[in-house]
Amino acid sequence: MRSCSNKGWKTALIPYFPKEIREKLNSLPDDVEVEEIRIRIGKPIQILYGINELIVEADNFLVGESECQELLDNICFHSIYAWEDELKNGFITLPGGYRIGLSGRAVIQDGAVKRIADITSFNIRIARECKGCADKVMPYILDVDGAPLSTLIVSPPGFGKTTLLRDIARQVSDGINGARACKVCIADERSEIAGSWRGIPHNDLGLRTDVLDSCPKAWAMGRLLRTMSPEVIVTDEIGSEPDAMAIMDAATCGVAVLASAHGGSLNEVLKRSSLRKITNSGTFKRYLLLSRSRGIGTLEQVADENMNLLFRRENCG
Amino acid sequence: MGKALLMICVFSCCTLTGLMVATKLRLRYDCLLGLLNSLRQLRAKMEYSALPLFEIVKRIGDARTSVLWDSFSLQLEKGDAVAEAWKRAVHDASSKEEMFGTLKEKESDALSDFISSLGKHDLATQRKAINVIELQLQECLDEAKSELSKKGKLYSSIGMLCGICGAILIW
C-alpha cells in the first residue's frame, strides 16, 4: 500500500524563514506538492512542484540580503561554528531530512575550500517519505531466497532516488514484500535517507536498521562493515573513486549494497570514470533507471549486471 | 523607652545600609566570576561538542548563573534572534537573581556586544571573540575584587559608625 506525503513541510520548515518569506509560503495552497523552494538574493521566491514552477511575485517582493542572512542564521540555529563542515560542503540538513543547498562565495585557504560565505542562494528540497514506493521494484532486486541483490538506482537529481532507496531499506529491514528480513546499515552522508537530527532517524527505516549519519560515505561503509555486521549497506549519491572502492570492498565481503547515482541513462553511468570500475566488476547485480514521466520515481528500466533489460516501461523512449 | 527604640532603629538602619552597599560589591564580584567561568565552559563546549548554541548555553553556568543561561536558551529555542534573546534573558534573570543588576554599564555593554556576535562566525573567529571578552571581564573582575577588599569593609564599618553616631545624637 503506497502512501506518500510531504504535507508536513509547512509546519517543519516555515519557522526557519524570515517573516516576509514565511507569509508568502504560508499563502501557498496546501494541495501543491512542493518539491523545491529556491531563494536567491535580489530575486523573487521560486517554488518548484512536479514539472511546474511558481514565481512568487506578489507585492513585487524580492529577497534581500537581510532575509538571506536571517535564513542562514535560522537554519544554522544561530550556530555557524557548529555547521562548518556542512557549510564547506555547501549544504545543511534540517530535522526531518530537509536538505538545503547553499551557494555564494567560496572562501579558499591553502588551496582548499574552507567554507561558503556570503550565501546568496538557497535550494530547499522538500523531503518525502513514500512508504510502498518500492513495491514495484522489489521483485527485481531480490534473489530466490528473498535476499537483496546489490542494486544501483540511477536518475537525474530530484527524480526520487533517495525516496526509493529509503523504502527499499525499510522493506528489506522489515522483511516484507518477499524480502528476507536483513540487518541494514545506512551510510547517510547528507542525512537525507534517514532524516536524522543529531543522530536520531526521523524516517521509518525498518526494525533492523542502523544509521551512521553525517559521515563521508566511503569511511562510513568501511566502519559499518567492520563494526555492525551488516547484511545490506545502503548509501546515496555515489560518484567518487573512494565510494566505488568502498562499495567493491563491501560486495567482496558478501554484503549487498543498495546505492544511487546521478545519471540520465544507464549508459551515462557506465561512462563515468569513477563508476566504470565498479560497473565493470559486476558488483551491482541490478540497475534501476527512474524518470518523472509519470510522476516522480517512475520506474523506466531494470537491467541486470550485463545491462540486459529485465523491465522496460511501455512507451519508454 | 521610645528613645531607646529609636536609637536601635537608627543603628540598625545605618548598619544595614552599609552592609547592603558592601553586599552589592560582593554580588558584582560573584556575578563577574560566574560569567567568566560560564564563558570558559562555553568555549570548551563549542570546541568539543559542536552543539547548537541553544543546547550549549543550557549546559553552562553554575547554580546562580544558570538562571541567565537557561532563560537565554529558552528564548533562542523560541526562535528569537541572539541579541533579542540575550536582552530578554538578562531582564528575566535580573528579576530573579539580584546579582545580574549589579553589573556596571560598560560590563553589560561588553557582554551584549559579544553575545550579539555569538554563533555568527566559524569556530576560529568565535574562539577569538571569547578570548577578547574573557580579557575584558578579567579586568573587570580584578577591579571588582580590589573594590570589594578596599571598600567592602569600609562601607559596612561606615554604616555601623553612622548608626552609633545617630544613636549617640538621639541619646
Image (spheres, coloured by chain):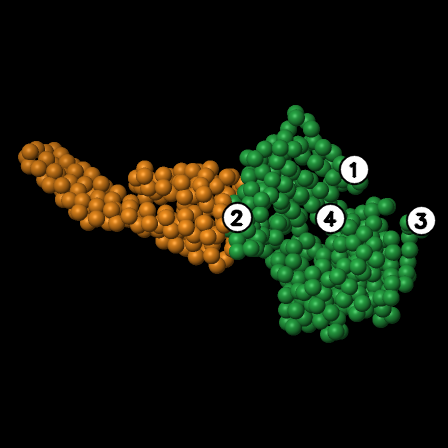
Chain colours: A green, B orange
**Relative image position of residue B92 (x, y in whole percent):** 41, 39
Please tell me which of labels 1 and 3 falls first in the chain: 1
The label on residue A52 is 1
Residue A34 in picture, x, y percent from top left = 73, 40
Q: Earlier in the sequence, mark 2 or mark 1?
A: 1
Alpha carbon separation for disc pair 4 and 3: 27 Å
Q: Is residue A171 visible?
A: no
Q: Label 1 lies in what chain?
A: A
From the image, tell me which residue sits under label 2.
A80
Chain of the residue displaying label 3:
A
Secondary structure, mark 1, is strand
Question: Which mark, by number, is residue A315?
Answer: 3
Contact between marks 1 and 3 (CB within 8 A): the answer is no
Residue at 59% over, 33% down: A64
- Ranked by sequence position, the earlier of labels 1 and 4 is 1
| Whole-number angstrom distance, CA of label 2 to CA of label 1 | 34 Å
Q: Amino acid at mark 1?
A: Asn
Amino acid carrying mark 3 in the image: Asn
CB atoms at circles 2 and 4 under 8 Å apart? no
Horizontal placement of A302 versus A246: left or right?
right
- The CA span between labels 1 and 3 is 22 Å
Measure the C-alpha gap from mark 1 to mark 4: 18 Å
Q: Nearer the viewer, residue A285 or B78?
A: A285
- Dot 4 and dot 3 within a common chain: yes
